[in-house]
């Protein structure tokens, strides 16, 4: 079984501002810094020691799709000549609870590019005459 090395700038990767703010540097040699020393393969000073630093628990709880609705009783709606009335709220990607990297999707497969997950909210009414 081969080993895998992860580099912050590997394969045109982009460093996020929050990864730069609390990282280990010679000026900030805090052993409990949130992020390790950033290196590139070409700088000659990089650390390529095997580490489990980038391994994360991928357990998460996500609500991907939720719809809540209420159908009014027909004895109320028929008084205004409507046979059926239903109001509803629908949401997609409402929330995700995880301990993964900040801003990253825990469902992301290794090596995939990703875009932020968009939440969608809808409120509606169905009327049948």
Image (cartoon, rainbow, N blue to C red):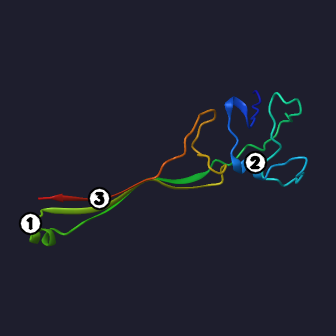
Q: Position of residue 67 (x, y in %)?
A: 36, 57
- Front residue of 122 and 27: 27
Q: Residue at the spot x=68%, y=38% of the render? A: 14
Image point (88%, 54%), residue name = 30
SS for callout 1: loop
Q: CA distance from mark 3 to mark 2?
A: 43 Å
Q: Dot 2: within a 10 Å radius of its alpha carbon, few (fewer than 14), some, or many (20 or more) residues?
A: some
**Residue corresponding to mark 2:** 20
Q: Is residue 44 left or right of residue 92?
A: right
Pick whichever of labels 1 and 2 is earlier in the sequence.
Answer: 2
Q: Circle 3 sits in a helix, a strand or a loop, which is it?
A: strand
Residue for badge 3: 124
Residue 2, position as x, y percentages in the image: 76, 27
Image quadrant of residue 115? Answer: top right
- For disc 1, the marked residue is 81
Mark with earlier residue (3, 2): 2
Q: Earlier in the sequence, mark 3 or mark 1?
A: 1
Give the side of residue 48 with respect to residue 112, left or right: right
Question: Image quadrant for the N terminus?
Answer: top right
Residue 125 percent coordinates (x, y)? 25, 60
Q: Picture coordinates of residue 17 (x, y %)?
A: 70, 48
Displayed quadrant of residue 126: bottom left
Report the residue at 51% width, 47% height from top.
117
Mark 1: give few (<14), some (14-19) or many (20+) Cα within 10 Å.
few
Instruction: Mark 3 vs mark 2: give the one in front.
Output: 2
Q: Quadrant of residue 53?
A: top right
C-alpha separation, residue under disc 3 versus residue under disc 1:
20 Å
Q: Left or right? Give the position of 94 relative to 22.
A: left
On-image quarter of the C terminus: bottom left
In this view, the residue in front, 2 or 68, is 68
Q: CA distance from mark 1 to mark 2?
A: 63 Å
């Amino acid at each position: 079984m081969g080993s895998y090395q992860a580099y912050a700038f590997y394969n045109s990767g982009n460093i996020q501002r929050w990864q730069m703010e609390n990282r280990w540097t010679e000026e900030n040699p805090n052993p409990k810094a949130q992020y390790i020393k950033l290196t590139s393969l070409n700088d000659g000073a990089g650390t390529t020691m095997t580490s489990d630093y980038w391994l994360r628990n991928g357990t998460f709880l996500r609500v991907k799709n939720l719809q809540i609705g209420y159908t009014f009783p027909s004895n109320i709606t028929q008084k205004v000549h409507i046979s059926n009335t239903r109001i509803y709220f629908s949401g997609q990607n409402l929330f995700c609870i995880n301990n993964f990297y900040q801003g990253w999707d825990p469902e992301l497969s290794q090596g995939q590019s990703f875009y932020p997950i968009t939440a969608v909210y809808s409120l509606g009414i169905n009327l049948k005459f």
